[in-house]
Amino acid sequence: MRPSLLVLALSLCLAACGGGSGGPEVPPSPYTLHVDATLGSDGNDGSVVAPFQTVTFALSQAQSGDSVKVMPGLYDSAHGETFPLKVPAGVELIGAPASRGSDPAATILFGSGPATDDFALNPNTKATVELGSGSRLVGLFVTNPDQVPGAAELGVAVTQTDVEIVSCTIRNTPGLGVATYLGAANVLVADSYFFNNGIGLHVRNGTTICVEQNYLATNQVGIATNWGIDMGGGAMGSVGGNTIALNVQADLQVLNGTGITVSAQNNAWDNVPPSEHVGATNPQDGRDVWIFNAADAVDTTGAQIAVPLP
């Protein structure tokens, strides 16, 4: 919990009078709340020496401009989490960016709960994380384990503006790893890994999104889009650098049908030039590009052969 105004005033007074060596420190600005599933308690103050236990509680205390720093561990309902985890507007939820939340010190968000954002396409939508406007998800491993008939399972749900998903691992979600819906705009997805999801990244319904330097493999579909995605060389300034390979049905699936050209320059694929299938019939052979309607096109200028991860 945040120190009270009285505590802040006393600490400032002590510091000004030269007698603050034993008093409470003024919290940093922006404020950082700490979470540790093993050593923490939600009765603590969220400081580095007295962290909270659950991400759920830390997010309930966070305000715009704050960061919630999550130590390695498993964060699931058995350890007190309530899903979906709702990242407030302007808050950064950060784990271990250097490892993308994965090995050797995994920071795992594992769970599912009824989504509260507006998912009109399927009211029975369940999510692991929901991101508020201006929020950031950094260095976390996200899995939605649900497999409920008739439900839509989302790892990370985005319906707000100015959201960033950076240096994360999105894995083993049977539905959609990351899904952007109506209302999402100016979204950045960068330097993240997408493995073994139904669809790694699903972009639809009026969203604008910049996708760069990600690795998407062994999903049923790597990326599916029917709207304003920039995978390289497009209006949002993506540098490309994505590797989209070894996905079961298709690496990129384009669903629009209104004559759009998807910017996908300077990416790595299974083939050069990328193999392409046009038509609604599923090719079932892992094509690089699957375009449902011949009115649409994909610009794969600068394509390279995918290199496996070390």
Image (cartoon, grey):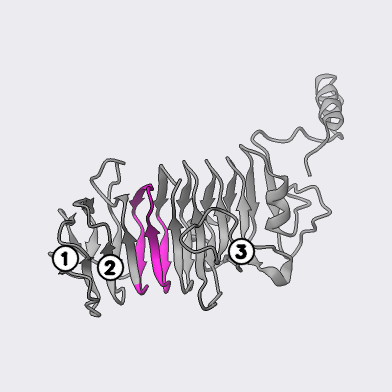
Contact between marks 3 and 2 (CB within 8 A): the answer is no
Q: Mark 2 = which residue?
A: 251
* Mark 1 and mark 2: Cα distance apart in space: 10 Å
Assign the C terminus to one quadrant of the image: bottom left
| Nearer the observer, 219 or 205 | 205
Is residue 309 among what the camera can see?
no
* Mark 3 and mark 2: Cα distance apart in space: 29 Å
| Nearer the observer, 188 or 23 | 188
Q: Which residues are magenta?
A: 191-220
Three-letter amino acid code at the position of disc 3:
Pro
Q: Give the left or right position of residue 6, taking residue 111 as reference.
A: right
Label 1 sits on a secondary structure element that is: loop
Q: Which mark is residue 114?
A: 3
- Residue drawn at x 28%, y 54% as measured from the top left: 241
Q: Earlier in the sequence, mark 1 or mark 3?
A: 3
Q: Give the left or right position of residue 265, taking residue 236 as reference.
A: left
Query: In the rendered picture of this protein, how many numbered marks are placed on residues?
Result: 3
Callout 2 environment at 10 Å: few (<14), some (14 to 19), or many (20+)?
Answer: many
How far across and how far down the image is residue 197, in percent? 43, 71
- Residue drawn at x 71%, y 51% as measured from the top left: 58
| Nearer the observer, 171 or 258 | 258
